[in-house]
Image (cartoon, helix red, strand yellow):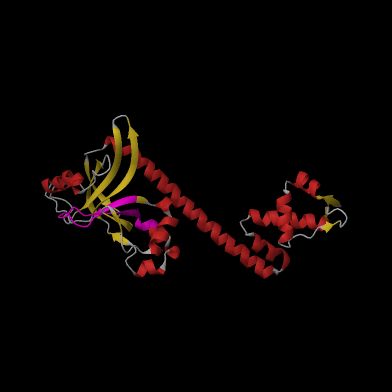
Amino acid sequence: MRCTQGEICRKLGFTRDTLRFYERRGIIQPEVDPSNGYRYYDDWQVNLLWECKAYQSLGFSLAEVTQILQDDGLPRTERRMQERIDQVERDIRIRQLELVQLRRHASEMRRAPTELGSFELVDFEGRVFVPMREDHDLVDEADPSAVAFINAYMALALPLCLFPSLERDHYYWGFAMLPTVFDELDEDRPEAGREQGGFVRVKPARALATWVDAGERWNFGLGLFDGLVAESRSRGLSPRGDLCGDLVARTHEDDGYHRYVHAFLPLAQAQTPGEPA
């Protein structure tokens, strides 16, 4: 068999640019007619094209494919396959985590407008938080490795605000994920971020939760959560700081701009006698 470049493109679905690229990488070596520059491909070159396409479809880079087709023995190719299997399994786990997060986020969005001002005692799971803004300014000493990590897995996080104290209107904004998700990603966490202060753990706790609407810009502050603090004290509960809230949605409605925050106030005292668990 001897095929022209046009026949390869038409019958096998390759483009001329792809063929030229494979040729420059040394994957294929078509016969070139010196009189007109036409390229011809025999059975062997066609086989290499098919195999190259097959390996690329499995997720191997072109550099890896070149080594597989030109240099690797069977043991090395098997190792590459196992490495790729491990990566695909990890990708599947990440996608599963993303699916759980999407469903959770959608559920929170549905609840937000109808549950404003309501209160419930919950088992707050905690958060792993990367602060990026302090009040209205960027954090001076944000850990670059922690920021890079959260940016890489932004689909698994939500914007979060954190008030370290109930005595001062001072807060942080950043992105946070559930501790279980964070721990699932353990092998990808940067060493510097683990050892330094790149990640802030908001501890799990029994908490009083509510929904607030932060509305337009400049409205944000500790005062938005006065009702939550007052409700906790009216129930005889003792808030212990670390008030935080997930920013669930920003919406533009006929009645204005809304920012829905699901807020959690950790409690030093979980419940009063007779309080439902």
Q: Residue at position x 68%, y 54% from top?
A: 54
* Picture quadrant of residue 56: bottom right
Q: Residue at position x 34%, y 37% from top?
A: 251
Q: Residue furthest toward the top?
A: 254
Q: Horizontally, is 10 left or right of 246 in the view?
A: right
Q: Horizontally, is 85 left or right of 66 in the view?
A: left
**Is residue 180 in the magenta section?**
yes
Q: Horizontally, is 184 left or right of 241 in the view?
A: right
Q: Residue furthest toward the right?
A: 35
Q: Horizontally, is 67 left or right of 257 in the view?
A: right
> Can residue 162 be spotted in the picture?
yes
Which x, y percent locates residue 9? 76, 47
Q: Residue at position x 24%, y 49% from top?
A: 264
Which x, y percent locates residue 202? 28, 58
**Is residue 80 in the magenta section?**
no
Q: Residue at position x 63%, y 55% from top?
A: 58
Q: How many marks?
A: 0
> Can residue 126 be spotted in the picture?
no
Which x, y percent locates residue 259? 30, 41
Residue placed most toward the observer, 99 or 241: 241
Query: Compared to 212, does 140 lie above or below?
Result: below
Residue placed most toward the observer, 103 or 199: 199
Which x, y percent locates residue 59? 61, 56
Query: Compared to 130, does 191 lie above or below?
Result: below
The residue segment tinted magenta is: 159-181
Residue placed most toward the observer, 25 or 33: 33
